[in-house]
Image: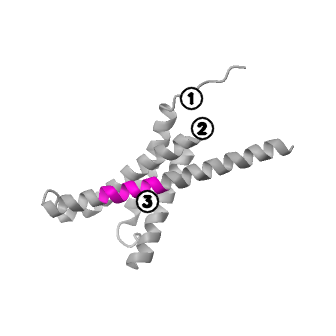
């Protein structure tokens, strides 16, 4: 009896580590994409009115990359892991916005950030599942 519970605990820990690692990677990638967008705005290549679109696209790209990293660490359940990575990314953005800017992203276009994060993570889960290269076990 102790063996399956121990394996289940290890599996849960591996999934949690994969989701948190993917969320961290997604956050860093999102910040880099926003930095790239700010640089393009400063060069005049992108108008300032496109700020919301840049932020949502940064969430999608970050959640996609982070979801692929998170789902790659977990052997199964790649779609829920990708969606969880998207949710972790949104919660990180929500926390950073509340702590450093005294504003919640929900006040100005936060729904777009939430949907972008979840869609990016979901697509990453589906891509990881489709191209994961899982081997079938033979009995």
Q: Which mark is residue 75?
A: 2
Q: Nearer the viewer, residue 104 or 44?
A: 44
Pointer 1 or 3: first along the chain: 3
What is the chief secondary structure element of the magenta stretch?
A: helix
Give the number of the mark in front: 2 or 3.
2
Q: Which mark is residue 13?
A: none
Query: Quadrant of the rendered structure where residue 97 is?
Result: bottom left
Cα distance, mark 2 to mark 3? 26 Å
Residue 8 appears at what percent x and percent y? 73, 45
| Residue visible at 47% across and 56% down in the picture | 24
| Residue visible at 37% across and 60% down in the picture | 112
The answer to whether residue 126 is magenta is no
Pointer 2 or 3: first along the chain: 2
Whether the residues at callouts 1 and 2 have beta carbons within 8 Å, the answer is: yes
Residue 78 appears at what percent x and percent y? 55, 41
27 to 102, vertically: above or below: above
Q: Is residue 133 visible in this depiction of the protein?
A: yes
Cα distance, mark 1 to mark 3? 30 Å
Residue that mark 3 sits on: 114
Residue that mark 1 sits on: 134
Q: Secondary structure at mark 3?
A: helix
What stretch of residues is rendered in magenta?
Answer: 24-34
């Amino acid at each position: 009896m102790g063996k399956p519970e121990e394996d289940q605990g290890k599996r849960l820990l591996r999934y949690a580590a994969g989701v948190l690692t993917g969320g961290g990677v997604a956050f860093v990638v999102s910040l880099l994409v926003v930095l790239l967008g700010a640089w393009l705005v400063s060069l005049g290549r992108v108008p300032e009115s496109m700020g919301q679109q840049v932020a949502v696209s940064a969430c999608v790209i970050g959640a996609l990359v982070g979801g692929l990293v998170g789902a790659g660490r977990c052997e199964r359940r790649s779609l829920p892991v990708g969606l969880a990575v998207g949710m972790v990314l949104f919660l990180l953005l929500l926390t950073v916005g509340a702590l450093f800017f005294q504003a919640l992203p929900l006040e100005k276009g936060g729904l777009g950030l939430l949907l972008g994060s979840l869609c990016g993570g979901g697509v990453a889960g589906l891509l990881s599942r489709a191209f994961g290269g899982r081997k079938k076990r033979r009995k």
